[in-house]
Image (tube, rainbow, N blue to C red):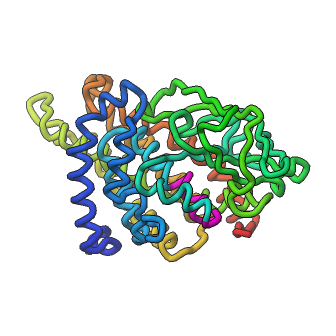
Amino acid sequence: MSLTSYYLKGEHQLFRQELRNFLQKEIVPHIDQWEKEQEIPRWVWKKFGEMGYFGLSYPQKYGGLDADFFYTVVFLEELARINSAGFGASIGAHPFLACSHINAYGSDALKEKYLAPSMTGDIFGCMAVSEPIAGSDVANIRTTAVRKGDVYVVNGSKTFITNGVLSDFIVAAVKTKPEAKAGGLSMLVIDRKSKGVSANKLNKLGWHASDTGEIFFDQVEVPVENLVGQENWGFYYIMDRFQLERIIMAVSGVATAEYALEYSLEYMSQREAFGRKINQFQVLRHRIADLASEVEALKTFIYHVAQLQCDGKYAVKEASMAKLLATELSDKAVYQCLQFFGGYGFIEDFKIARMFRDSRVGTIGGGSSEIMREIIAKMVIDNISYKTK
């Protein structure tokens, strides 16, 4: 029995075909243009919402489909095949980061106001945690939110935020009790049009279709009812949601490696050198064999981690391992696959060039490889146990 048939049922495969057809018809023809423009037009969000893609794992009450997590796995795998990790990052940041916090901890009023229209694609959001001096060190963020009557007054800045310039709302980590460090973090939903909110787009090495930016808050007034969950519990919410982000990046990473290998094999079956197809040279065949083995083994582990997510398990160690290994393998696989193309690998007309740029950020974003290793080391060596509050 194949890996996919063991974990994925007939309905998952039907969904894959429908999604692949949709992406090939509606998205792929425009990708190069969006890469140049460095943003995604509004109609795309609406189209994804109409197709139900933003609501795969969300409650039907707010317009979701309440589907199991393997629909999300299929969704991510197919996004990896359109060869624009920036597009995938922007589309994914909305449901898997911004909406995820609101759905997990937000009030019914917040869900009605933000989650329901997010499912239809009428609005889309971003998640703002990282700051110029604080990335994975979440407890060290300095953006403050001081309560004054019925509002919080927010001051500070965020950086490296996917959808940071064009999104309609921002789910931001703020300090409501600075002296408490990790215990003083809270989450607020901030409307983009609020007075005092501004943003600046970042010029990136890759992920060109993704709107990634810095966000600035200058005396921004946010209604108290826009608090996500309880005040000063934000650190625990972020730690809990990090697991989902890492699984998302793991699935995307191994899918990218798999697609790079598939694309390279197609090229190698056509390219000739010294009178034979280059897929017949032993040194290249053995490199392919090694990569294919690593991809298959890691994909099996990641599907196991996806099953843990499906079952509601808080698997910090496994999710961190998956994210570390998958993003490292993606970087390695794309690097080696580019070599198979020779000089053509350095030409933008070939997909592998964009893959090479886009893949690199995987070992940095969502918790760097170094942070993943330290989390794993703490659990394996120091017997530290991570739990939700």
Q: Is residue 286 left or right of residue 133?
A: left
Q: Nearer the viewer, residue 195 or 208?
A: 195
Q: Nearer the viewer, residue 215 or 137?
A: 215
> Image height check: is 323 above or below 260?
below
Residue lying furthest front: 150
Question: Which residue is depicted at the point 47% across and 72% down?
Answer: 310
Residue in view at x 55 percent, y 74 percent: 312
Residue 215 position in % (x across, y down): 64, 33
Placement of the C terminus among the 4 image quadrants? bottom right
**Residue 211 part of the magenta segment:** no
User: Toward the viewer: 65 or 195?
Assistant: 195
- Within the magenta stretch, is there residue 100? yes
Residues drawn in magenta: 96-108
User: Quadrant of the image for the N terminus?
Assistant: bottom left
Taking depth in this image into account, of 167 and 377 the one nearest to the observer is 167
Residue at x-position 40% and y-position 64%: 56
Instruction: Give the prevailing secondary structure in the magenta stretch.
Output: helix
Residue 256 lies, in percent from the top left, at 37, 47
Residue at 20% in and 39% down: 281
Q: Position of residue 112 (x, y in %)?
A: 55, 61
Q: Is residue 341 visible?
A: yes
Q: Quadrant of residue 158?
A: top right
Residue 140 lies left or right of residue 369; in this view the side is right
Residue 245 appears in the rendering: no
Point out residue 275 in the picture as x, y percentages from the top left corner: 8, 30
Does residue 224 lie above or below 4 as drawn? above
Q: How many marks?
A: 0
Residue lying at the far left of the rendered structure: 275
